Amino acid sequence: MAKNTSNLQIDSARLWGTIHDTAKFGATPKGGVRRLTLGPEDKQVRDWFRTACEAAGCEVHIDALGSMFGIRRGRDMSKAPIGLGSHLDTQPTGGKYDGILGTLAALEVVRTLNDAGIETETPLCIVNWTNEEGSRFQPAMMASAAYAGDFTTDDILSRTDAEGVSVGQALDSIGYRGAEPVGQIKLSSFVELHIEQGPILEAENKTIGVVDHGQGIIWYNGTMTGFASHAGSTPMPLRRDALATFSEVVLAVEKLARDHGPNAVGTIGEVVVANPSRNVIAGDLTFTMEFRSSDEATLAKLDRALHPVVAEIAARRKVAIDLDTLWRKEPTHFNADVIKAVETATNMLGYSNRRVTSGAGHDACNMNGVMPTAMIFVPCKDGVSHNELEDATQPDCTAGANVLLHTVLSLAGVAQ
Amino acid sequence: MAKNTSNLQIDSARLWGTIHDTAKFGATPKGGVRRLTLGPEDKQVRDWFRTACEAAGCEVHIDALGSMFGIRRGRDMSKAPIGLGSHLDTQPTGGKYDGILGTLAALEVVRTLNDAGIETETPLCIVNWTNEEGSRFQPAMMASAAYAGDFTTDDILSRTDAEGVSVGQALDSIGYRGAEPVGQIKLSSFVELHIEQGPILEAENKTIGVVDHGQGIIWYNGTMTGFASHAGSTPMPLRRDALATFSEVVLAVEKLARDHGPNAVGTIGEVVVANPSRNVIAGDLTFTMEFRSSDEATLAKLDRALHPVVAEIAARRKVAIDLDTLWRKEPTHFNADVIKAVETATNMLGYSNRRVTSGAGHDACNMNGVMPTAMIFVPCKDGVSHNELEDATQPDCTAGANVLLHTVLSLAGVAQ
């Protein structure tokens, strides 16, 4: 059997076909995908995915937060399944690969095993996690975090989007509030294939990234309160301009990240001025902020350094700045055995590779807290993601799926 | 008659009552007014104002842009009326006095002359200009600008708000697209009473500001195009962050205004990030910008200095910045004879006063281009306006209305 399976390859054309066929659910004019979690396009792709998993002989379970689990039987059903998958939701202007590749490659792995008539010792479980992106509901990766015990199910169900719709209401509106309590479907390990979302593999011309670390993340919500007054008749020295104050904070966050680099990034991606008018000095605004590093000490240093810098700007400008830590995730150190399984499969298949750190957060980072976990990266064009221009090649996606296949086989064992 | 009229005073309680009674049209919880031009609250106050003008014996005309003209007959109807008034629209979170004081004080002047049985030689015309604020439709002061010939009526009618509603559609929706061609109602001079919207009169404890200049204004619309990518996996040196670029521009505009001060201000009051997400680097955004100065040379210097500064930031950050000049108004030098009439009336009434420059743009600045014009300022609390906290005292508003009364009388002449 070992001989048979070592030659086994996934069906590249079928994988590529499912990626591009399902991209129609939320397709954007620029060739990207807008599939906000638990929205109508998410329902469309979920319905398609459930049907496809069942057609591949999987028993589909849906938990109370809408995460989908397609279980393929193994010879020994007393063993907890090996999880493989990712997510099918996207950013507001996202691409065709982020999350989607890992979920559809997991389906392709099962289809390949079916075609080859291979039964594994341990059962497998294809997973589609709810709301990995965190664009519509915060925090990101909420469903896998709840699975890992970081949040209660009720807490997550009560989170609301910008229109005040709760996760619970959104689940009901698309019929994906499942019967399974969150965390009840036990897995013995988890493997996630994903595009790199960074420039390293492409720059070094490597096909596979063996992911050994994940960046830690701190998310903040902020508000600023200056004083709205007439832009023509308020002398410059008498202003309490919230937008000028915000601008100093944006540049300070950028500088902090650079000063703590290269293993650190800091971003302010959102700002909303209250009651804006071109001839009124901005009085109130809200914004979001984040820091990331794969090193605990660096992340802690960034957080410590941030507050006095912001306080100095606020005091000097007489503008109140309120910063709340919305979410904090320490850096991830993936499981040595699963990393080794990924590396062994990659080398067996002869793909060029290197160890990499994940710059983005992933559901796998949550899984790693409760079970042996690792990730597989493939290059994406110019390191671009969270953008409609996100792109990856068929050979690279195929290579990633083959590594996923053989990693899972080595973890699950082939029934003799 | 001179003796009679020199003792004449407006009815302070009646003026104060109309200001606070009409503040219910668009009243906000914080005690301000939200009365966006040509919206439902604007219709309410316009209907009230028309009825009040007619009750005061005025013949009300409405022009094709909705500006309202209430004509009080004079002995010699061959003479063009003397205009007095301001506007009744407000900022999104505006106050009870900006524009409103000047319009209701004009009504109070006519009511006072009626009560005293005084006929003027030259007719008078109470004016309520459409869209002085420019918050819903740009540019600000569009109706008085069209009256002065700076824009065609059709151009202004085609301007649209954020929802794509045109000025023409908005006028029809509230029934204020009038029959009079814009500019047909000729006036021989114009006097506008307004709150200062600045801190000078209060700081120097003066009751009346005799306005001899108005600031010139340049309005810009801007867009920035960087590249939206993943906030976690895009290294700091590889970013093309539109929001960080915008922040540099905000601080550069602030510095330019300070460097050219004290007779200069620069403001960025609006920014909108396209498809914002907390974990996506901002790729595209739009913003507005303005400079003001009462000195032509300073205003020109600011405009010249701006472009190379913005170009340097754009080139260094590899973010495209597009700046369009939406509107430019050169500084206003009000008419010497009308300024003298205001100053004489003020001194006759014994009010403390000083010459001041208007930091804000006013309809009077447009009128000054086509007829002898001046303005009267009264103090407002802390120089605050365009804010729900905008405040002024009854004695100061009364003093301003009395100066308006006697300025108009000296210009119109009392029928012998």
Image: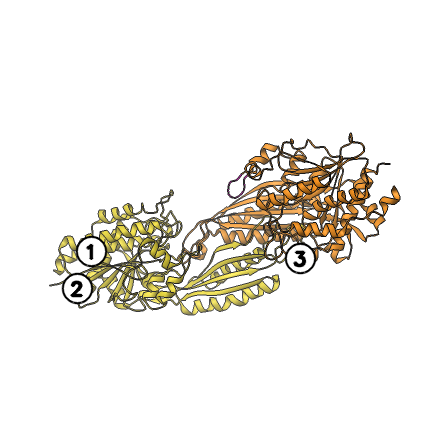
Chain colours: A orange, B yellow
Would you say the residues marked 2 and 3 are in contact, meaning their CB atoms lie under 8 Å apart?
no
> Which comes before the other along the chain, label 1 or label 2?
1
Chain for disc number 2: B
> In terms of secondary structure, what is the magenta stretch mainly?
loop
Q: Is residue A406 magenta?
A: no
Instruction: Decide if residue A7 is on the left or right side of residue B158.
Output: right
Chain for disc number 1: B
Q: Is residue B314 above or below residue A145?
A: below
> What is the span of residues highlighted in magenta in the rendered image?
A160-165
Instruction: Decide if residue A184 is on the left or right side of residue A229.
Output: right
Amino acid type, mark 3: Pro
Q: Residues within 10 Å of mark 2 (few under 14, many from 20)?
A: some
Figure quadrant of residue B134: bottom left
CA gap, disc 3 to disc 1? 67 Å
Q: Position of residue B282 (x, y in %)?
A: 58, 54
Identify the element where label 2 is drawn: loop
Relative depth, front residue between A121 and B144: A121
Instruction: Decide if residue B24 is on the left or right side of residue B10.
Output: right
Q: Residues within 10 Å of mark 1 (few under 14, many from 20)?
A: many
> Which comes before the other along the chain, label 3 or label 1?
1
Residue tagged by mark 2?
B413
> Can the viewer see residue A296?
no
Look at the image and tell me in which quarter the N terminus of chain B lies: bottom left
Q: Position of residue B399 (x, y in %)?
A: 25, 53
Amino acid type, mark 2: Gly
Residue tagged by mark 1?
B110
Figure quadrant of residue B180: bottom left
Which label sits on residue B237? 3
Q: Residues within 10 Å of mark 3 (few under 14, many from 20)?
A: few
Relative depth, front residue between A328 and B326: B326
Amino acid type, mark 1: Val
